[in-house]
Amino acid sequence: MNPLARSAEELLPDSISSTNWCFLLLRTVLVISTVCAAFVIPFFGLVMALIGSLLSVLVAVILPALCFLKIVGKKATNTQVVLSVIIAVWGITSAFFGTYSSVLKILQSY
C-alpha cells in the first residue's frame, strides 16, 4: 500500500501532501477500497493466494539467489554456488506447489 500512497501523494501539491491529515486520509481510503474489493470480487482470497505463490516466492527467494550468482560470478565458492542453487530450486518447487494448490482451490470453488 505504501508505494501506491506515496505515488498518489506525489501527484498532490506540496502544501496538501505534506500534512498529516492527507497521510491518514489517503491510506485510510486505500485500505477501505481494498476491503471493498475483497468483498465484491469473487475468489479474491484465492486470486491473492495465486499471485502470492507466484510472485512473492519469485521476488523473495528465487531472484535473490540467482542475482547473487550473477553478480558474484566466477568468484563464488563451491559452497555458495551449491547453496544458491538449492535455494533457487527450493523456491521454484515451493512456487510450483503453491500455484498448483491455488489453481486447484479456484477450480474447486468454480
Image (cartoon, grey):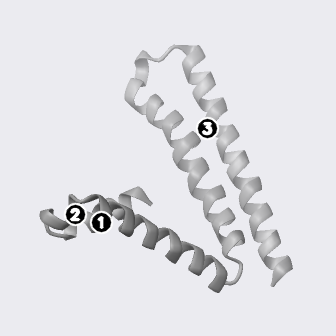
Q: Which of the labelled discs sits on residue 88, or is there none? A: 3
Q: CA distance from mark 3 to mark 2?
A: 41 Å
The tag earlier along the polypeptide, 3 or 2, is: 2
Which of pointers 3 and 1 lies earlier in the amino acid sequence? 1
- The reply to whether callout 2 and callout 1 are in contact (CB within 8 Å) is yes
Image-based side of 64 in relation to 86, left or right: left
- Frontmost of labels 3 and 1 is 1
Q: Is residue 61 above or below residue 72?
A: below
**Figure quadrant of the C terminus:** bottom right
Residue at point 82%, 70% (across, down):
104
Instruction: Specify whether 7 is left or right of 73.
Output: left
Q: Nearer the viewer, residue 38 or 104?
A: 38
Name the residue furthest right. 108
Q: Amino acid at mark 2?
A: Ser
Q: Which mark is residue 17?
A: 2
Q: Secondary structure at mark 2?
A: helix
Cα gap from disc 2 to disc 1, whole angstroms = 6 Å
Q: Which residue is mark 1?
A: 22
